[in-house]
């Protein structure tokens, strides 16, 4: 059923409710429409990306631009000479020789104009593409540095739009728009001077219509800017939903919600189409304004021009040249109007790009941060309080003392704070109050790179990159040799299944490793972590997706992996945590119990309750 038919069957209140649901679902805080005045500071910042290439190529572009403009402005002057001196001179004796000479000059000028245009376009395209390359690179590099909280609040599709669509929308501005703006401004100035030199009375009369045009067109500018911002916003929501739909297609089909999903997409697609049509219609408003103003100027030209010819103040050739110059006068004004629209589109995108570039990482190195030397692995949490949102504590005064080489199991109900603790060890978030130290050093006083280089993390849903099996394992340590990669795979019992693949370690795997089973992907992540050889190892539900038979295979590998390292294990399976040196039981952000498996089972506490609950489902 099409969305229109679906909406037709709804009452007005149902429609309002459905529209509100759509709006709530797809309006993201970072995508709020930015209804601000034109920001000249941002405009300057955007064009600052051209500065590195200004000395290198911009002089050539300017030379070609001036050359092309001069030749274009010279042609009407030669035309007036041809009429007044060669075709219909005052003495009544036409001169074919002069006509041929002037015609040849015009042909040469057109050839020069064409050559200048070819090289100008070549150089501007090179500059434009280099600027886009730099801008896209800066944005991607900056996003890599942003903290987890940035990605927690934004869907991947919304971020993708900034790096692709918004950057691409600036290409025309940098490859053509800037130079065309300069050409049109120079051409306008030249034409105005020439018109006044030919006949100042006629020149002023024709140009009196220009202020009228600008007064009318300025009324549209604010509306056009907002309209293009809305287009970017709608497109961002489409991309966000598209990314979400692709990632969740299995769930959608499992619950047969394809039609509902199509309805959502259809609604957003319709909104995008309407927003584009609205912005485009406003853009076209400049055309009629120019045409009407140009028509009024032409009427003044021929009415006053005829009078001046009769009075002897103007020749026919001068009027023809004047008419050509006036025609050329309105063309750049029209292009400037279009250029302004293009600039508004670019500024709407640049606002969104610079919004991300100005986003400061919540977690970053202090100015005096020092590299963390090779650690033993002693970790302490001292009265640690952490809030994802102000006023809602995820951890409430955690005190935890872990000795180097100890294995710590974190258990508790969902939302008890297990994942929060391991995120704080790697300083993916900064604590709200308290202190986390490694070997007595506050982790906020050392560089992030030196800290995270000594921490290895194996997640439940391990990420497999597009590439070979060997490259995915080597991601743990990029300078590892092939033999070291294979030794790591053998240690975690992954070598056997890898060698059964079509090309062994050189087998290409697709994004997220969809051709591999969950267990195989986890084995690769173990090999990756072992190859990295971290001093602190974190296993976050790392064996949750592995079947019992596979888990038994890797128990010995896990002993090798954990040996000599401080390790944190988040798991629900008793087999994974019972041999831990210390089990920490969490509940609502607080430590309720600590001890070995034997010590905790001897008590009638929270840990025993968790074990009993687990066995009830076996």
Image (cartoon, rainbow, N blue to C red):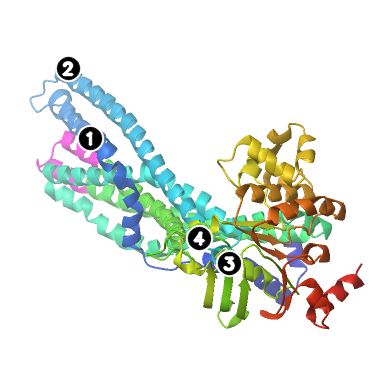
Region in magenta? 303-325
Tell me the distance, in whole angstroms, between the alpha carbons under discs 1 and 4: 43 Å
Residue sitting farthest toward the top: 97
Position of residue 460 measured from the top left corner of the image (x, y, whole percent): 72, 58
The mark that comes first in sequence, 1 or 2, is 1
In the image shown, does 396 or 259 lie closer to the viewer? 396
- Residue ID for mark 2: 96
Quadrant including the C terminus: bottom right
The mark that comes first in sequence, 3 or 2, is 2
Quarter of the view holding residue 400: bottom right
74 lies left or right of 50: left
Position of residue 114 measured from the top left corner of the image (x, y, whole percent): 31, 28
Question: Who's the residue at 46% across and 63% down the image?
Answer: 446
- Residue ID for mark 4: 146
- In the image, residue 242 sits, relative to residue 582, either above or below, namely above
- Residue ID for mark 3: 378
- Residue ID for mark 1: 63
């Amino acid at each position: 059923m099409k969305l229109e038919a679906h909406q037709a069957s709804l009452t007005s209140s149902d429609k309002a409710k459905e529209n509100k649901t759509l709006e709530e679902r797809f309006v993201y805080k970072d995508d709020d429409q930015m209804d601000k005045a034109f920001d000249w500071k941002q405009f300057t910042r955007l064009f600052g990306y051209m500065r590195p290439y200004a000395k290198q190529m911009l002089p050539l572009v300017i030379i070609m631009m001036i050359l092309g403009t001069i030749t274009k402005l010279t042609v009407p002057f030669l035309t007036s000479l041809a009429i007044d001196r060669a075709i219909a001179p005052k003495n009544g004796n036409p001169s074919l020789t002069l006509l041929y000479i002037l015609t040849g000059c015009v042909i040469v000028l057109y050839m020069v104009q064409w050559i200048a245009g070819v090289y100008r376009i070549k150089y501007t395209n090179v500059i434009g593409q280099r600027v886009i390359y730099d801008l896209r690179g800066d944005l991607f590099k900056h996003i890599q540095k942003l903290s987890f909280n940035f990605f927690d609040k934004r869907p991947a599709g919304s971020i993708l739009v900034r790096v692709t669509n918004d950057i691409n929308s600036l290409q025309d501005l940098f490859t053509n728009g800037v130079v065309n703006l300069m050409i049109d401004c120079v051409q306008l100035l030249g034409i105005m001077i020439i018109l006044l030199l030919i006949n100042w009375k006629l020149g002023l009369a024709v140009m009196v219509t220009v202020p009228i045009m600008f007064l009318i067109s300025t009324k549209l500018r604010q509306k056009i800017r907002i309209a293009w911002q809305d287009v970017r916003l709608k497109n961002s929501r489409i991309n966000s939903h598209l990314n979400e739909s692709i990632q969740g297609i299995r769930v959608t089909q499992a619950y047969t919600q394809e039609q509902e999903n199509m309805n959502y997409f259809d609604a957003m697609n319709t909104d995008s189409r309407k927003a584009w049509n609205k912005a485009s219609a406003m853009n076209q408003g400049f055309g009629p304004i120019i045409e009407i103003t140009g028509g009024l100027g032409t009427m003044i030209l021929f009415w006053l021009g005829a009078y001046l010819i009769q009075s002897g103040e103007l020749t026919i050739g001068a009027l023809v040249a004047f008419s050509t110059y006036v025609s050329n006068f309105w063309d750049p004004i029209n292009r400037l109007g279009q250029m302004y629209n293009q600039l508004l589109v670019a500024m709407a995108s640049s606002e969104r790009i610079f919004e991300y570039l100005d986003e400061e990482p919540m977690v970053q190195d202090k100015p005096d941060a020092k590299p963390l030397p090779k650690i033993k692995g002693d970790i302490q949490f001292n009265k640690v309080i952490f809030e994802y949102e102000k006023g809602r504590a995820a951890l409430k005064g955690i005190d935890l003392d872990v000795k180097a080489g100890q294995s710590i199991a974190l258990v508790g109900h969902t939302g008890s704070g297990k994942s929060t603790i391991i995120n704080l060890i790697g300083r993916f978030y900064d604590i709200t109050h308290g202190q986390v130290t490694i070997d007595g050093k506050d982790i906020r006083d050392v560089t992030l790179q030196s800290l995270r280089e000594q921490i290895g993390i194996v997640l439940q849903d391990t990420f497999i990159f597009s590439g070979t099996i060997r490259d995915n394992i080597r991601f743990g340590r990029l300078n590892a040799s092939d033999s070291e990669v294979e030794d790591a795979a053998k240690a975690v019992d992954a070598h056997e299944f890898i060698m059964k693949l079509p090309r062994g370690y050189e087998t290409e795997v697709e994004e997220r490793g969809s051709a591999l089973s969950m267990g195989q992907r986890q084995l690769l992540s173990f090999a990756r972590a072992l190859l990295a050889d971290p001093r602190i190892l974190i296993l976050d539900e790392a064996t949750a997706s592995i079947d019992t038979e596979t888990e038994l295979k890797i128990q010995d590998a896990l002993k090798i992996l954990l040996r000599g390292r401080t390790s944190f294990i988040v798991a629900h399976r008793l087999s994974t945590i019972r041999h831990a040196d210390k089990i920490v039981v969490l509940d609502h952000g607080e430590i309720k119990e600590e001890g070995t498996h034997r010590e905790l089972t001897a008590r009638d506490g929270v840990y025993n309750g968790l074990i009993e609950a687990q066995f009830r489902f076996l």
